[in-house]
Amino acid sequence: MSNGLFGSGSGSLVLALGLILCAAAGYFLGSVNSAIIVSKLKFGQDIRKFGSGNAGMTNMLRTYGKGAAGLTLLGDVLKTVIGCLIGLFLLGESGGYVAGFFCIIGHVFPIYYGFKGGKGVLALATMVCVLNWQTFLVLFTLFVLIVSCTKYISLGSVMCALLYPIVLSKFAEPNIFATVVSMIVAILVTVMHRSNIKRLLDGEENKLKLGKEPVKTWKLVVLNAVIVCITLGAILLDITSSSGMTERKNPAVSYGDYYISELQLRYMYVKTADDFLSDPANAETDIVKNYDKTKKLDEQSINGQTYAEYFMDIAADEASRLMILFAEAKKAGVEVSPTDDRCLAEFSEMSKNFIQGDSYGRYINRVYGKGVGESDIRNIIISQFTVEDYIKSVGEKTADDAVKNNLSSVQIDKEDTEKIINGDYK
């Protein structure tokens, strides 16, 4: 998957334009509601005035039958597919998630129909299928099992929406847009089904088979409550792990309230080795002359150290200095925005090394190891430019004195450094 038409731009305005176009295309396409169009053209009625009042496929099925539901399915799938493809073309994988998200927003709050639309399940399912088919297969299988066992479409929809961030994290490459979108749509779809959830808990929700009175028993109420609680608990666990809380408890390098995770240190380690070995200024040094490209860094030694240990020492020292000066920069009010042209240029520079089919996520995993994400690298880059601006404002001597005076307060996790230098990252 490519970076798209705007993905390789080096300026914040180019990126902003790409995001705006993805969002606009997604929203205006998503606002085209197939259920409302089919109900008005074919039956001369507004589906929102019948059944559950929802302008979606399920209500169409219950109100007008399979034919109308099929047309609704086709229309809503097509609009979301087109929206996601436009996003992929404009901004690559990230653009696909942005456009897909706004397709869902448009479906739920359509500008053409007084901002009253469907619940977003079909649009969400289509987006998942287009952008990560493995995740779609897992969620679709779960949906079929839940609906087959319970006869509740709403229960299957809500549970699969809530499980979306968890399943996506297992199959997709690290991508900040994908992570944020998956969490927001999980919450959005759940909120849109709040009346269904209440009926489920009360044992009054309509089942897939029409005409049969719902059975209201305490066992059903307890079962539904347990299912919902388990699902919400799983989502909470996913959100806390995705936010880096685990890394905060066990940082690789820490200084006061600031830390560098093992994944971020791994990035700094690999980049340190790459920069040193590829720098023409180091070509005549023994460390470069004796380096065997056919071997791993931990399989060859120089001056009593493996190459891996040598470069880890450099990376750990740089990480320690970075944390101290970043803390000083924060105290001094020095701050660099993620949309700073220098930060964006760093990501643009990476694209020069992409191979056919690479996305940022795939490239990062290939070079720095599985698990390292765009956010890990972005945070390091932002920190480096923040420190750079701080040093310019106070001078090299003041910065060096700050490092010298506080170096003993930096904590380095030896287990993490050993894990990195013994890993197959190079």
Image: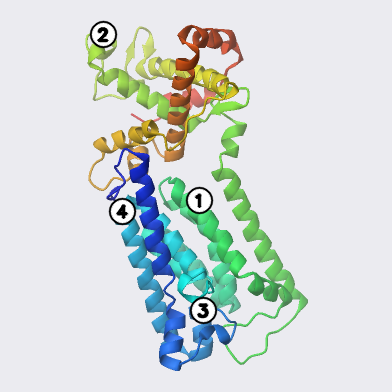
Look at mark 1 in the image and give the residue it sits on. Answer: 180
Q: How was this image coloured?
A: rainbow
Give the percent coordinates (x, y) of residue 68: 43, 87
Label at residue 285: 2
Mark 2 lies on a secondary structure that is loop
Residue 422 visible in the shown view = no
Q: Are marks 3 and 2 in contact (CB under 8 Å)?
A: no
Decide which of tag 3 and tag 2 comes sooner along the chain.
3
Give the percent coordinates (x, y) of residue 112: 45, 74
Residue at horizontal 45%, vertical 61%? 102
Mark 4 lies on a secondary structure that is helix
Q: Amino acid at mark 4?
A: Leu
Say left or right for 232 vs 132. right
Q: Amino acid at mark 2?
A: Thr
Which of 141 and 61 lies nearest the eye of the viewer?
Answer: 61
Residue at horizontal 42%, vertical 83%? 37
Mark 3 lies on a secondary structure that is loop
Decide which of tag 4 and tag 3 comes sooner along the chain.
3
Decide which of tag 1 and tag 3 comes sooner along the chain.
3
Q: Foreground mark, 3 or 2?
A: 3
Query: Marks 2 and 1, how far apart in space?
Result: 46 Å
- Mark 4 Cα-neighbour bin, 10 Å: few <14, some 14–19, many ≥20: many
Q: Foreground mark, 2 or 4?
A: 4
- Mark 3 Cα-neighbour bin, 10 Å: few <14, some 14–19, many ≥20: many
Look at mark 4 in the image and give the residue it sits on. Answer: 90
Q: Are marks 4 and 1 in contact (CB under 8 Å)?
A: no
Q: Are marks 4 and 3 in contact (CB under 8 Å)?
A: no
Look at mark 3 in the image and give the residue it sits on. Answer: 55
Residue at horizontal 43%, vertical 25%? 385
